[in-house]
Amino acid sequence: MSRFFKGLGRFRRGPWEMLATIIIALGVFMLMQPFVMWAYSYSFITTLVGTLMFIVVSHFPEDE
């Protein structure tokens, strides 16, 4: 776990891509759940932010 946080601090691709993927998955989950209206309302923006974040961090340098 320590390597994950160090990777976030040094702008390495692996940890940031993982975080972006988690945000995308959270947005999809929020879209598919039938119980909480506010989660459904913010699902699109959450998925969009995760997708844009993934596009940006895919240009970060590779992990060493």
Image (cartoon, rainbow, N blue to C red):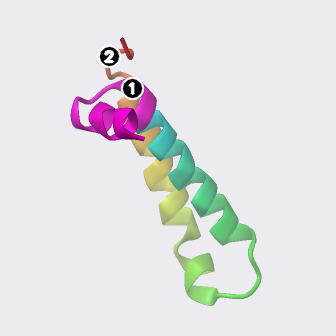
Q: Residue furthest front?
A: 2
Q: Pointer 2 and pointer 1: residues touching (CB < 8 Å)?
A: yes
In the rendered image, the vertical position of residue 8 relative to residue 27, given as above or below: above
Q: Residue at x 77, y 82 (%)?
A: 34
Identify the secondary structure beneath mark 2.
loop
Residue 36, quarter of picture: bottom right
* Dominant SS in magenta: helix
- Quarter in which the N terminus is drawn: top left
Count the marks: 2
Tell me where residue 44 appears, x and y as whole percent: 56, 64
Viewer-nearest residue: 37 or 6: 6
**Upstream in sequence: badge 2 or badge 1:** 1
As measured in the structure, the alpha-carbon distance from the residue carrying label 2 to the one carrying label 1 is: 6 Å
The residue stretch that appears in magenta: 1-15
The residue labelled by disc 1 is 13
The mark found on residue 61 in the picture is: 2
Q: Position of residue 48 (x, y in %)?
A: 49, 54
Does 52 appear above or below 42? above
Say which residue appears at 55% left-offset and 44% top-offset. 21
- Label 1 sits on what residue type? Arg
Residue 12 in the magenta stretch? The answer is yes
Relative to 41, 49 lies left or right:
left
Across and down, in percent, residue 35 comes to 73, 88
Horizontally, is 64 left or right of 32 in the view?
left
Q: Amino acid at mark 2?
A: Pro
**Residue lying furthest left:** 10
Residue 14 image position (x, y, % from top left): 44, 27
- The answer to whether residue 10 is above or below residue 49 is above
Q: Residue at coordinates 48% horizontally, 64% vertically from top-left?
A: 45
- The front one of 53 and 6 is 6
Q: Nearer the viewer, residue 60 or 8?
A: 8
